[in-house]
Amino acid sequence: MKKLLATVLALSCAMAMLVCTAAATDVNTSIEGEYVTSGADGFSYDFSYIGKTPSEMAKITVTFTVGDESLGFGGAIVLNTWVDGFGWASTEWGNDGAGKTITAVSTGNAGEYSISLDTTGAFHGTGEAEEGVYNKIVVQQYWGDPITVTKVEAYDASGALYYSLPATAETPSTETPSTETPSTETPSTEDTPQTGDAMSIVMIAGVAAVALCGVVVCAKKKNA
């Protein structure tokens, strides 16, 4: 009976999703990953495999770019979860002035905007593969020039970045290279013979040479 009820609920929600996405615009993405999808059904990502506890995520921010802003743009951001039952919570978003629950905010870069959604208590599981658990976020677009999702960020209850897609690159080291000046110390002359020592060596060598000559001369006279 439980399996039948779950199947009926899943089919009902799936039909509702089809109705919602019937007039949807393709959503593109520059993000690559095993659990990333995009297209007519919108952009989606499953947080069930991030290796961190999804329930710690209190806010999701999605950044995207749009070509022609003059047309306006908007759609819905959906929490599609499953843990002992199907969940589909949709919140509409749109450009400034569209009158939607969530307003797209400019990041300061041309044609780039972000939308944020409170996800406190929405996600479940351990962040590892678990049967019967998934934690998807879906971004749909209903009007305007097609958007391209470029980044998804999750924040914890304290406001600290908890997870980023794509992963945030490690900040390069800002350590200042050493500017130590090479040593200009004069090499030690301890082992170099001093001038006085050199003269002494020359004199000793001279005396030894004279003595040797004397020995040779005496030897020659003796043999004569």
Image (tube, grey):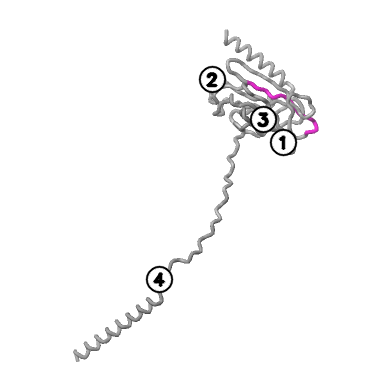
Q: Point out which mark residue 192 bears.
A: 4
The quarter holding residue 93 reads top right
Q: As shown in the figure, which amino acid type bears the numbered disc 4?
A: Thr
Q: Earlier in the sequence, mark 2 or mark 1?
A: 1
Vertical placement of residue 101 versus 190, above or below: above
For disc 2, the marked residue is 131
Q: CA distance from mark 2 to mark 4?
A: 82 Å
Please state the horizontal and vertical placement of residue 106, each as a whole percent of the image: 74, 34
Q: Residues within 10 Å of mark 2 (few under 14, many from 20)?
A: few
The quarter of the picture where the C terminus appears is bottom left
Q: Which of the two residues, 69 or 98, is positioned nearer the viewer here?
A: 98
Circle 3 residue: 61
Frontmost of labels 4 and 1 is: 4
Point out the tag, 4 or 1, that comes first from the N-terminus. Answer: 1
In space, the residues marked 4 and 1 are separated at their CA atoms by 71 Å
Q: State which tag comes first along the sequence, 3 or 2.
A: 3
Q: Amino acid at mark 3?
A: Thr
Q: Give, as a three-letter code, the residue at label 1.
A: Thr
